[in-house]
Image (cartoon, helix red, strand yellow):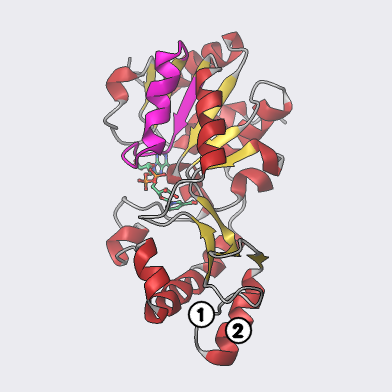
Amino acid sequence: MIASDLRGGVEKLGDMIAEAKVIVPFTGAGISTECGIPDFRSPGGIWTRNRPIPYDEFVASQDARDEAWRRRFAIEPTFAAAKPGRGHRALAALYRAGKIPAVVTQNIDNLHQNSGFAPDHVIELHGNTTYARCIGCGESHGLAWVRERMDATAHAPDCPACGEPVKTATISFGQAMPEDAMRRAAQLAQHCDLFLAIGSSLVVWPAAGFPMLAKNCGAKLVIINNEPTEQDDLADLVIRHDIGETLGPFMGN
Ligand code: NAD
C-alpha cells in the first residue's frame, strides 16, 4: 500500500512501530543525503561523475590504486563534515528504546555508529570508508597514515607489515561480500516482525534480497524512498517521501 500523503504515512508507520517487538532497519545512501553525502544514482550522485574502480583493477594496477585514493581524499571534507541526520537519529532512538537490535546498512559513512549504535550493532554489508585495511593481512590503517604516505611518495601505499595494497575498508565491485555481515543480516531479517528499507534503490544484490527474505519469514515490510523501487509491490507500506521528514517525528528527545 502506498501512503497517500506524508502525514498518513507517518501515522501508519507509527502504528506499525508501536505494534512491532523487533524492528530491523536496512539503510542505503538515501538516509545520508541530508547529511551532505550524495547517493550513487540520483542526478549529481557519485556514479554520474566517476566510473567505479572494480576490485581486480585496484589489485592489479598501481595507477588504479593511486586514482582510487585521490578520489577518496577528494571527498574526505564531505565525509568528515557529515553528522547523523534525522533518519539516523530516529533509528538510534528506537535502538535505545530496545526496539531495534541492530541496523543493517549498505552505507560506508559510519553515521549509524556516530548516532549512537554500538559498532557491533551496525552490520556493514559494503564495509566502511572511514579507515583503511590491507587486502593481504587485514591490518587496519588510519586515513591520516595513508595520506601521509601519498604526500611523501605520490603513490598509494602498501602495507608495512606484509607488502600488499592498502584499500579503504569498503567492498568494491567484484570483491567478495563479508561473510559474517551477510550471515548476521540474514538472521536479523529472518527474526524481525518489522523490516524498514530506508533510502536504498534496492538494485544492488545480494544486499537487495534482505527485504524479500524478511517478508517471506513473516515480517511486515515498509519501504521509505522518494522514488519508486522495484520491490514496492512487496511492501505493506510504501512512503514515497523524504526520509528526514518521514522519520523526524520518531527522533524522541
Ligand atoms: P543508491 O544511490 O542506489 O540509492 C539511494 C536511494 O535513496 C535512491 O533510490 C534515492 O531516490 C533515495 N533517496 C536519496 N535521498 C533521499 C531522501 N532524502 N529521502 C528519500 N529517499 C532518498 O544507494 P544504495 O542503494 O544505498 O546503494 C548503492 C551503494 O552505494 C551502496 O553499496 C553503498 O555502499 C554506496 N554508497 C554509500 C554512501 C554512504 O555511505 N552514505 C553514499 C553513496 C553510495
50, 124: nearer the viewer = 124
Which residue in the structure is indicated by mark 2? 149
Q: Classify mark 1: helix, strand or loop.
A: loop
Residue 95 visible? The answer is yes
Task: Give how far across and how far down residue 72 sits, in percent.
Answer: 48, 69
Q: Quadrant of residue 226?
A: top left
Q: Earlier in the sequence, mark 2 or mark 1?
A: 2
Please give left or right for residue 203 compared with residue 223 in the image: left
Q: Magenta span has 53?
A: no
Task: Give how far across and how far down residue 116 sits, in percent.
Answer: 71, 41
Q: Please tell me which residue is depicted at 41% across the width and 54% down the height of the picture.
A: 175
Q: Please tell me which residue is depicted at 41% across the width and 16% down the height of the picture.
A: 215
Which residue in the structure is indicated by mark 1? 156
The quadrant of the rendering that contains the C terminus is top right
- Residue numbers of the magenta segment: 195-219
Q: Classify mark 2: helix, strand or loop.
A: helix
Near mark 1 (Cα within 10 A), the count class, few <14, some 14-19 or many ≥20, is many
Q: Magenta span has 204?
A: yes
Task: Give how far across and how far down residue 232 sits, in percent.
Answer: 30, 24
Please give left or right for residue 250 compared with residue 214 in the image: right
Q: Quadrant of residue 49?
A: bottom left
| 123 w.r.t. 130: above or below | above
Near mark 2 (Cα within 10 A), the count class, few <14, some 14-19 or many ≥20, is some
Q: Which mark is residue 199?
A: none
Q: Residue type at mark 2?
A: Arg
Q: Residue type at mark 1?
A: Ala
How many circles with numbers are drawn on the protein?
2
Q: Are marks 2 and 1 in contact (CB under 8 Å)?
A: yes
| 48 w.r.t. 30: above or below | below
